[in-house]
Image (tube, helix red, strand yellow):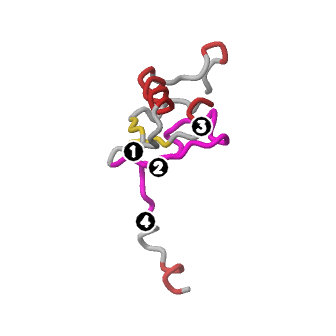
């Protein structure tokens, strides 16, 4: 179930402050965030965020196509190493 339209998109308050500070500064640095549940807003386009996946910060360069999605969608938490007993793949 999605969020109600009248509430608007959810974004942590500190995230807006960090993005505003990064916009005003001329350096292109990674903004470290832990809020995977926050929605990507149009103000974030062009910025680079380091989204924490529980182990490390994954750099995410925000583009126009990402607006409306959540930060967690672009930072996977699990690494797939393959099926343990897939003998068909080993033969071919």
Q: Height in image: 63 above or below 20?
A: below
Q: Which comes before the other along the chain, label 1 or label 2?
A: 1
Q: What crowding class fits label 1: few (fewer than 14 Cα within 10 Å), some (14-19), or many (20 or more)?
A: some
Residue 66 covered by magenta stretch: yes
Residue at image coords 53%, 43%: 73
Residue range highlighted in magenta: 56-80
Q: Are marks 1 and 2 in contact (CB under 8 Å)?
A: yes
Q: Using the image as rendered, state which of residue 40 and residue 54 is in the foreground.
A: 40
Mark 2 → mark 4, Cα distance in angstroms = 13 Å
In this rendering, which labeled residue sits more in front, label 4 or label 3?
3
Badge 2 or badge 4: first in the primary sequence: 2
Q: Nearer the viewer, mark 2 or mark 4?
A: 2
> How far from the left and from the top, in percent, is residue 83?
46, 68
In the picture shown, does residue 33 fall above or below 83?
Answer: above
What residue appears at the point 46 percent right and 67 percent down from the top-left corner?
82
Residue holding disc 3? 45
- Relative horizontal placement of residue 50, taking residue 40 as reference (left or right): left
Task: Tell me the residue that label 1 is attached to.
Answer: 53
Q: Which residue is mark 4?
A: 81
Residue 92 in the figure: left or right of residue 49: right
């Amino acid at each position: 179930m999605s969020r109600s339209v009248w509430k608007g998109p959810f974004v942590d308050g500190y995230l807006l402050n960090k993005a505003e500070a990064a916009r005003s500064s001329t350096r292109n640095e990674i903004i470290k965030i832990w809020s995977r549940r926050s929605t990507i807003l149009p103000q974030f386009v062009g910025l680079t965020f380091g989204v924490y996946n529980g182990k490390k910060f994954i750099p995410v360069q925000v583009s126009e196509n990402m607006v409306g999605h959540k930060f967690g969608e672009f930072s996977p938490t699990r690494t797939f190493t393959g099926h343990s007993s897939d003998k068909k793949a080993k033969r071919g």
